[in-house]
Image (cartoon, rainbow, N blue to C red):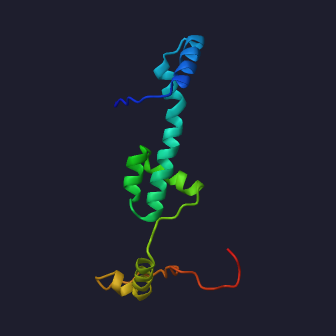
Amino acid sequence: MGQLSFKIPDSEMEFLHWFSERTSQPIGALYRNATFDLYLEWKLEIILKEYQRGVIGFKQLCRLSSKSFQAMSMILQERDIEPAISEIMDEYTSAVRDSLTAKDIFKDGKVPKRISQPITPKETGRVP
């Protein structure tokens, strides 16, 4: 665990001393508890913005936030955040997807007997 040292105004120290005596808690613990949750929210906002800009990937996002893949996936879903994919990459992957046939995918020449559903649904005129 790391340690930070910084100065705060005398008026704030006066309050911390007063509240410390009232609650019988150390001044450092009072200040740490009051600020650490805000720090975690601030950190999460910064790294989520970097993820949205495409500066960091999902794995680094999870590592920097100290959250599991599942927990971070839930946060991204709750906040409706999509991964940053450039238009060039999106167009390229769409073109590759559209050009693939069953014979391209199954190199040994075997084609499955069952017909797979298309990757992109056809326009049906109804909303899913």
Image location (x, y in percent) of residue 56: 38, 59
Q: Residue furthest left?
A: 108
Residue 71 visible in the shown view: no
The structure residue drawn at horizontal position 47% and vertical position 46%, both measured from the top left corner, is: 43
Q: Indicate left or right for 109 with 113 as reference.
A: left
Image location (x, y in percent) of residue 64: 39, 47
Answer above or below: position of 126 versus 38. below
Q: Residue furthest front?
A: 10
The quarter holding residue 126 reads bottom right
Which residue is nearer to you in this view: 35 or 8? 8
Pick the quarter of the image with the N terminus. top left
How many marks overall?
A: 0
The structure residue drawn at horizontal position 44% and vertical position 58%, both measured from the top left corner, is: 50
Image location (x, y in percent) of residue 63: 38, 48
Image location (x, y in percent) of residue 103: 35, 87
Q: Indicate left or right for 33 with 54 as reference.
A: right
The structure residue drawn at horizontal position 31% and vertical position 86%, both measured from the top left corner, is: 109
Residue 38 visible in the shown view: yes
The structure residue drawn at horizontal position 52% and vertical position 79%, both measured from the top left corner, is: 117
Answer above or below: position of 4 versus 29. below
Pick the quarter of the image with the C terminus. bottom right
Answer above or below: position of 2 versus 26. below
Which residue is nearer to you in this view: 37 or 74? 37
